[in-house]
Image (cartoon, helix red, strand yellow):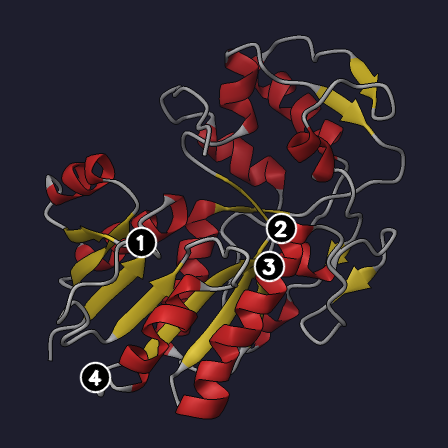
Amino acid sequence: MTKRLFCFGMGYSASALAEALSSRGWTVAGTVTSDEKRDALKAKGYDVSVFSREHPLEDGALNGVTHIVNSIPPDEQGDIVATLVGEWLAATPSLEWAALLSTTGVYGNRDGEWVDEDSDLTPTSDRSARRVLAESQWLDLYREKGVPAEVFRLAGIYGPGRNPLDAIRGGKSRRIVKPGLVLGRIHRDDIVGVLLAAVEKPNPGAIYNVTDDEPVPPQDVVAFGCELLGVDPPAEEPFETAEMSPLGRSFYVDNKRVRNERIKADLGYVLRYPSYREGLTALLAEPARPPRTH
């Protein structure tokens, strides 16, 4: 039987997975939030439709689907897919695997301590609290309806067109310093690699942290990027006095180290970019692109 991937939300990471599986002969379909995005992806050969709470999924959209990736950010009601399409997923006999892309933000602030997939969830923002609700709704599809649902908690994502090198080249990079703060990150290619490994080893109900081996202060990543590009790093700015939007400031609240042993032990995955150094060095060979804003 031909494998068919359906992406709820054809965003940055899901689109990369779609490309990887399409190259293997899979058929790919999915959703976006606007006609403009739909038309751009249809030009690439994908069967894409607009989907939101105001635009329900078309009848028959999930016919023959074997694998699902859900990367739509939750709203106040939680996960739009679980709440609107959960019954459809439960009634899709061809479905073999259903992944929710969540975030390590669900762990909240731990003052630099280590957490793993079994740690309590203590979100510090409304945005992360919505992720906790969405995860619960997604896993309830497995617990209550037998949907082969899994959760993947992603650290800060970077990759082609979305990385510090592009920001440095564009003169938009900053080194904001909050003493003691460390952040985890993950290259988009490693997200795709983990998901491909999980497709080969489905484990309904599983939760995986997807992050690199080395959580570090964010200013160190900028400094290394400047070193690669041969430019002087921007001056350090104290977090307390740095001018930032409320959203930008929120990324400096949670301080934690996230363990990733489960993707290695259970999925046998070996990180292609175990730290920002390998990831940025590889991206240095990529053509310069404008920084992504979403």
Q: Please report whichever mark, 1 or 3, sits nearer to the chain's N-terminal start.
A: 1
Provide residue 104's location: percent of width, then percent of height: 64, 57
Residue 273 against residue 228 in the figure, above or below = below
The amino acid on which the numbered mark 2 sits, given as a three-letter code, is Arg
| Residue holding disc 4 | 94
Q: Quadrant of the N terminus?
A: bottom left
| Marks 1/3: CA–CA distance | 19 Å
Q: Residue at x 84, y 56 (%)?
A: 110
Other residues around mark 4 within 10 Å, as few (<14) / some (14–19) / many (≥20): some
| Marks 1/4: CA–CA distance | 27 Å
The amino acid on which the numbered mark 4 sits, given as a three-letter code, is Ser
Q: Which numbered circle lies on residue 130? A: 3
Q: Please report whichever mark, 4 or 2, sits nearer to the chain's N-terminal start.
A: 4
| Marks 2/1: CA–CA distance | 21 Å
Q: Quadrant of the C terminus?
A: top left
Circle 2: element type: helix
Frontmost of labels 4 and 2 is: 2
Tag 3–tag 2 contact (CB < 8 Å):
yes
